[in-house]
Image (spheres, rainbow, N blue to C red):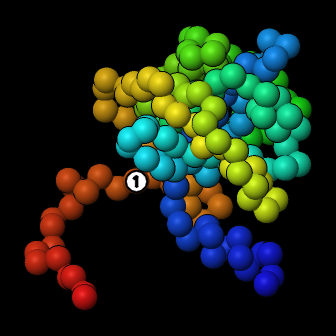
Amino acid sequence: MEDRAFRRALGEFATGVAVVTARGKGGELIGMTMSSFNSVSLDPPLVLFSVDRKARSLPAMLEAKGFAVNILARDQEQISNQFARALSDKWDQVKTSVGHAEAPLISGAMAHFECAPYAIYEGGDHVIFVVRVIKHASRTEAAAPLIFFRGRYRDLIDETEREPTWPLPIHY
């Protein structure tokens, strides 16, 4: 299977963008942008994200006592870019508060999920983290989500602005 063609096909699935944060054993702040975030279970409340085995912060993530999944809003594209770069000053001008296990909660995020470790799985060139949601919160004012599609950020069209097409085409 050709890697480039596989990545291109995966890019056909539009995703939201999250920054997963934690505090390392030595007190250092950890954060990385990812689109590999998904719900797993309502009972117990579980979500997952995956981290590349080559990520410099993987060892610290594996030792973290808790995580925050920060779902970014459209106006937080710069934050997404900051946390996507290795070895940069990711925390420069990013306002945070403290969540579960001292994981940073990024101010202005659309939602926060404060999580405790639950399970870790092998996933090829990634490690899959399944985490238990301890607490969650959503932004009170309406905001557009930060969407990633075909290798770049996109805007979501507000469906209320379009005329609905009825009946919807349903194929069985």
Tell me which amino acid carries mark 1.
Leu
Closer to the camera in the image, 44 or 11: 44
Residue 163 x, y percent position in the rendering: 15, 65
Q: What residue is drawn where x is 81% and y is 17%?
A: 25
Does residue 168 show up? yes
Residue 21 x, y percent position in the rendering: 66, 28
Residue 148 x, y percent position in the rendering: 56, 54
Question: Which residue matches tag 1?
Answer: 156
Q: What residue is drawn where x is 58% and y is 11%?
A: 98
Which quarter of the rendered picture does the N terminus lie within?
bottom right
Residue 55 appears left or right of 172:
right
Local secondary structure at mark 1: loop
Placement of 75 over or under 158, stated as above or below: above
Residue 70 appears left or right of 34:
left
Closer to the camera in the image, 11 or 118: 118
Q: Residue furthest bottom?
A: 172
